[in-house]
Amino acid sequence: MKILIVEDDENKRIQLSNYLDEVVPDAFLLIERSLQSGVRRIRREQFDLVILDMTLPTFDPSSDEPGDDTVIFGGKDFLSQMDRFDITTPVIVFTQFEVFGRGLNEVDLKDLDQELKKGFPEIYHSVVYYHASIDSWKTSLKAALVGTNCLRANND
């Protein structure tokens, strides 16, 4: 099984990778750290699953590029690109935010989940809320992996 992880936060990426190594030990994990590098990778290679952060920088972090180019709904842009290029790999959004945007553009996690299900029914599977100090994300991710057929239900 080949899994693409698109995640810019190092700690989150390490915890996610370590957990996937435990529950899907035969998986081959590839990591991208930005919207653009993730899109390039998914267009070049086939994957069984994408685990996608929602808030991503446009480009890979670099010491040559000062400033913050983070896109609040970068994961949504990623899904749009997958849809545009007819890429049907299942996607699980993996985020540490419960609310996105501000003011009139504010969207909570539940509403975002519904919006993505409606907008990308062929590829979007579910959202998993990650918190560094609470392990409940592992149970949610495991259920999502079962739901995408990337893990058997009785796999402990």
Image (cartoon, rainbow, N blue to C red):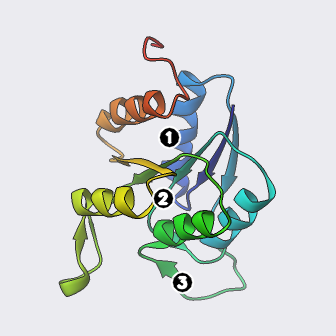
Identity of the amino acid at label 1?
A: Gln
Residue at image location 29% in from the left, 34% down from the top: 136
* Above/below status of 106 relative to 21: below
- Find residue 91 and report its horizontal and vertical position in percent: 52, 49
Indicate which disc residue 69 carries.
Answer: 3
| Sequence-earlier tag: 1 or 3 | 1
* Above/below status of 83 relative to 103: above
Identity of the amino acid at label 3?
A: Asp
Q: Nearer the viewer, mark 1 or mark 3?
A: 3
- Find residue 77 and report its horizontal and vertical position in percent: 52, 72
Residue at label 2? 53
* Extreme residue in the right direction: 44
Q: Is residue 34 visible?
A: no
Q: CA distance from mark 1 to mark 3?
A: 24 Å
| Sequence-earlier tag: 2 or 1 | 1
Identity of the amino acid at label 2?
A: Asp
**Badge 3 local density, few (<14 within 10 Å), some, or many (20+)?**
few
Indicate which disc residue 15 carries.
Answer: 1
In which quadrant of the rendered image does the C terminus lie?
Answer: top left
- In front of the other: 39 or 84: 84
In which quadrant of the rendered image does the N terminus lie?
Answer: top right
SS label for mark 1: helix
- Find residue 98 and report its horizontal and vertical position in percent: 26, 60
